[in-house]
Image (cartoon, rainbow, N blue to C red):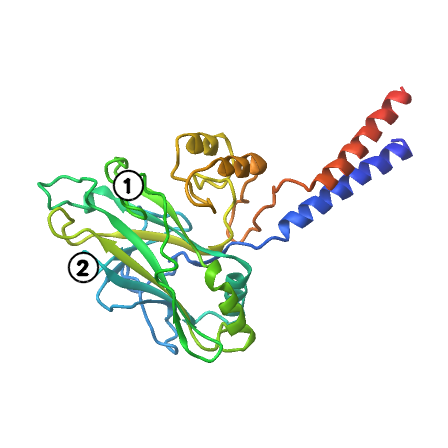
């Protein structure tokens, strides 16, 4: 191979490598709740709040009244098991809780979890409903007046060691298909036997305070406390749901969502455009409502995707910077110009 051709080809490789390195240096997904532990009493999942119990996984029940089992058939989105979370009552329930400092993994793992929290801006998980387990009290049917919401409470040690509670600020507006019940399950439009949805909580409003508490040493992987409390709220009364009801939960992770991926499938593609044209609802949308700016975000991000696998870096297929594109184009043009002049 000619020397000039080799030099040009190496130049393209360097440019592409620089582009991929810049993209892969983004924050990475960090999974902390897959519920795949080998259980001594299956299917019961141990929810332990003790700081010292060696069997603690960091997960506990805030109310102490729920029935926590695992499922290997419903709602499994990572690994082999999901958590079949059954609140203690239909209606508002403070329940499933993860506290970093009670997780008995090595301190290096807990430190890595804390770094992942600070490096990302969303807590995400997947929730699945089994339609047969949600029975309406309203003449036995399921109608749009029934709803099911999931919210999140963040509690952590502040700079001075105080407690911060941000339940209201971190209630999401998630994929519903039902504008009258933001954050709720819409059983009218979701007619399949089961329905799985990605839920994302943006904790950007408290990141500065978390960072300050971490810098002060009051909230770390081993010091102070940092907990996330899942709040469920399902319609009661008539119309409403009959107890018990079950949420299948899996793939809890800290992440930075992919802009323009409006259906949450990990790729910015034509399906996201179709969803935008239909007026939503849009996942990974960082603006209010469905607007023309959402189309611009989609167009600029088209073709991007999240890498597969736990802990993979986000944005490894990100669009190269214009300057990098020009360098690559110039190098490629040089290659073909050289080849034409030497035939």
Q: In front here: 67 or 206?
A: 206
Mark 2: few/some/many CA within 10 Å (<14, 14-19, 20+): some
- The residue most toward the top is 343
Return the residue at label 1: 194
* Location of residue 321 by image quarter: top right
Q: In front here: 102 or 257?
A: 257
Q: Quadrant of the N terminus?
A: top right
* Location of residue 14 by image quarter: top right
Q: Secondary structure at mark 2?
A: loop
The percent position of residue 114, horizontal first and vertical second, equals 51, 67
Mark 1: few/some/many CA within 10 Å (<14, 14-19, 20+): some
Q: Say whether residue 275 is left or right of residue 249.
A: right
Q: Which of the marked residues, 2 or 1, is nearer the chain's N terminus?
A: 2
The percent position of residue 138, horizontal first and vertical second, equals 10, 43
Q: Residue at x 18, y 56 (%)?
A: 90
| Distance Cα–Cα, label 2 vs label 1 | 21 Å
Q: Is residue 109 above or below residue 306?
A: below
Q: Secondary structure at mark 1?
A: strand
Q: Is residue 103 visible in this depiction of the protein? A: no
The percent position of residue 175, horizontal first and vertical second, equals 36, 43
Q: Are marks 2 and 1 in contact (CB under 8 Å)?
A: no
Q: Is residue 270 above or below residue 79?
A: above
Q: In front here: 16 or 234?
A: 234
Q: Residue at x 85, y 25 (%)?
A: 337
Q: Residue at x 55, y 60 (%)?
A: 119
Q: In front here: 319 or 342?
A: 319
Return the residue at label 2: 89
Q: Say whether residue 191 is left or right of residue 209.
A: left
């Amino acid at each position: 191979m000619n020397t000039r051709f080799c030099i040009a080809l190496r130049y393209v490789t360097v440019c592409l490598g620089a582009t991929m390195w810049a993209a892969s240096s983004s924050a990475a997904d960090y999974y902390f709740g897959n519920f795949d532990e080998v259980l001594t009493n299956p299917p019961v999942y141990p929810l332990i709040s003790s700081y010292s119990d060696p069997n603690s996984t960091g997960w506990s029940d805030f109310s102490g009244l729920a029935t926590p089992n695992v499922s290997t058939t419903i709602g499994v989105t990572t690994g082999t098991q999901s958590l079949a979370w059954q609140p203690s009552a239909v209606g508002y329930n403070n329940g499933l809780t993860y506290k970093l400092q009670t997780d008995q993994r090595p301190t290096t793992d807990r430190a890595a979890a804390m770094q992942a929290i600070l490096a990302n801006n969303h807590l995400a998980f997947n929730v699945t409903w089994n339609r047969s387990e949600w029975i309406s009290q309203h003449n036995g049917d399921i109608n749009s007046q029934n709803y099911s919401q999931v919210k999140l409470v963040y509690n952590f040690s502040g700079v001075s060691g105080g407690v911060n509670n941000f339940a209201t600020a971190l209630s999401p507006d998630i994929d519903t298909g039902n504008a009258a019940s933001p954050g709720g399950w819409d059983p009218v439009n979701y007619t399949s036997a089961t329905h799985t949805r990605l839920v994302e909580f943006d904790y950007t409003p408290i990141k500065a305070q978390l960072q300050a508490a971490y810098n002060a040493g009051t909230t770390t992987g081993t010091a102070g406390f940092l907990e996330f409390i899942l709040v469920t709220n399902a319609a009661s009364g008539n119309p409403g749901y009959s107890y018990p009801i079950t949420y299948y939960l899996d793939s809890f992770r800290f992440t930075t969502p992919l802009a323009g991926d409006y259906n949450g499938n990990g790729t910015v593609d034509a399906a996201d455009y179709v969803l935008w044209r239909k007026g939503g609802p849009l996942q990974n949308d960082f603006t209010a409502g469905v607007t023309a700016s959402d189309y611009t975000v989609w167009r600029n991000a088209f073709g991007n995707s999240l890498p597969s696998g736990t802990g993979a870096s986000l944005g490894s297929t990100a669009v190269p910077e214009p300057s990098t594109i020009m360098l690559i184009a110039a190098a490629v043009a040089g290659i073909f110009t050289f080849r034409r002049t030497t035939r």
